[in-house]
Image (cartoon, rainbow, N blue to C red):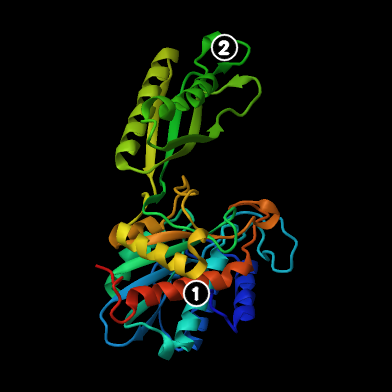
Amino acid sequence: MVPLKLPFLADLAAIRRDIHAHPELAFNERRTADLVARELSDCGLQVHRGLARTGVVATLRKGKGARAIGLRADMDALPLAEKNDFPHRSTTAGLMHACGHDGHTAILLGAARYMAEHRDELDIDGSVHFIFQPAEESEGGAAVMIADGLFEKFPVDAVFGLHNWPGIPVGEMAVMPGPVMAGTCAFEIFVHGQGCHAAMPHQGVDTLLVSSQLVLALQTVVARNVHPCESAVVSVTQMHGGEAWNIIPDDAVLRGTIRCFTGETQTLVEAAVERLCRGIGSAFGAQISVRFDHRYPPTVNSAAETEVCRGVVRQLLGADKLRDQELPSMGAEDFAYMLGEKPGCYVWLGNGPGSGGCTLHNPHYDFNDEILPIGVSYWVRLAETILGAGSANAPA
């Protein structure tokens, strides 16, 4: 089996580049949603709009089968100034598609178009719901779609996601069961001391010195509390305090992120952070408090659906093109919410070395249009594999 030949590939690449040139942030993907809905309607598919404000869902039904699956793509961009100079670079200052959601949207549109145009030839007995989700980047659009009734309005037996991945060669995919993306928790640490003249530090409690001790001590949380066979990350990403060069400030704030794959590890890490804050506060005479903001849960693939996806990749690309060594990742993904509701699988699609070798969330990144037909073919073959008449891969 080889990737499908797509007569409309040039159109699909043009759509992808148009979306790239017009990035929109979470819950504001109005132009993108209009484009998506128009393309789906032109294919003759039933289109529903309004879930999570800008979400779009289209449905293809064939036969009398009651089985159904969901295929999901994300649509939002990032608040990042693009540094590319190609013709389809962002036309909106300070915003860009630096994570490939423009490509994910184009791939799912291509799959919907192919299935609609080849409905009579498809080996499908059931329903495919094409889910175009807003607000994946830090805003939890998947959870909002679910709260708005996604799976009540569009019942599915399983749901599937896909993400391009720079560094994996074109024509290869990474698929594995279990946790594939980490859960994420933001934290804020508030340090209160006693401000004083910088030339007379003995008269105060130096919040910046205390904060510096905390930054170093927090790096021991994983190294000396988490089991060596488990994975976690604690990173301090912000440190704020002071406004003058000759004043030790009263207050300082540290912010950062915690990443891990289980609730047990998350609880352990939080307890260790709080313990360090109490100890360092006591040692230096400062008052320290911590606030945890739990965001995305871990993205966990179910075993049965993952094995089906691995089989599709083997048939589509060859057994030697199926990888798992890149997974899991400490990045986070709100597709986790959908997998918390339904079984399914989230896979990585090789994007090649990327523009200039850069990774995701880089101002020089661009999605590789060469992988559009591979992504489309994966979605189509997955739908046929699961929903084919008499398929042994039907969701349980």
Write down the residue under mark 2.
201
Residue 300 percent coordinates (x, y):
35, 53
Locate residue 329 relative to residue 392 in the image: left or right: right
The C terminus sits in image quarter: bottom left
Residue 160 is drawn in which quadrant? bottom left
Residue 19 percent coordinates (x, y):
60, 70
Q: Secondary structure at mark 2?
A: helix
Disc marking residue 135: none
7 shown above or below 198:
below
Amino acid residing under circle 2:
Pro
Write down the residue under mark 1.
1
CA distance separating discs 1 and 2:
72 Å
Locate residue 265 relative to residue 220 in the image: left or right: left
Q: Nearer the viewer, residue 293 or 73?
A: 73
Residue 67 is drawn in which quadrant? bottom left
Q: Residue at x 64, y 61 (%)?
A: 366
Q: Secondary structure at mark 1?
A: loop
Q: Residue 215: in sight, yes or no?
A: yes
Q: Residue at x 63, y 64 (%)?
A: 368
Q: Residue at x 54, y 19 (%)?
A: 209
51 shown above or below 191:
below
Q: Residue 338: in sight, yes or no?
A: no
